[in-house]
Amino acid sequence: MSQDNLIKLECTECKSITHHGHKNKKKLSKVRLELMKYCKVCKKHTLHKETK
């Protein structure tokens, strides 16, 4: 599995990177991924944005 498909998801409230995932570069354009995920630091569901 190549590392160029690996993305980091950063919490918008506490700015900590709590989730990692993979992104299909062929299907998705250059749009940054935004998901509602559970943050272990904040202990609640918050918006997570893709970082480099």
Image (cartoon, rainbow, N blue to C red):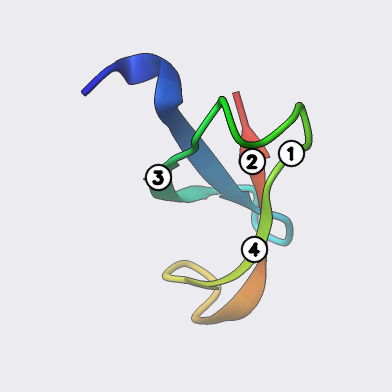
* SS under mark 4: strand
Three-letter residue code for mark 1: Arg
Residue 40 drawn at (x, y percent): 42, 70
Q: CA distance from mark 3 to mark 4?
A: 11 Å
**Vertical placement of residue 33 versus 48, above or below:** above
Which mark is nearer the camera, 2 or 1? 1
Which residue carries the number 1 mark?
A: 32
| Residue shown at the point (68%, 47%) measured from the top left | 33
* SS under mark 1: loop
Q: Please indicate whether residue 7 sits to the left or right of residue 2 in the image.
A: right
How many C-alpha atoms fall within 10 Å of the one at disc 4: few (<14), some, or many (≥20)?
A: some
Three-letter residue code for mark 4: Leu
Three-letter residue code for mark 3: Gly
For residue 50, the mark is 2
- Residue farthest toward the right in the current orientation of the protein: 31
Which residue carries the number 4 mark?
A: 35
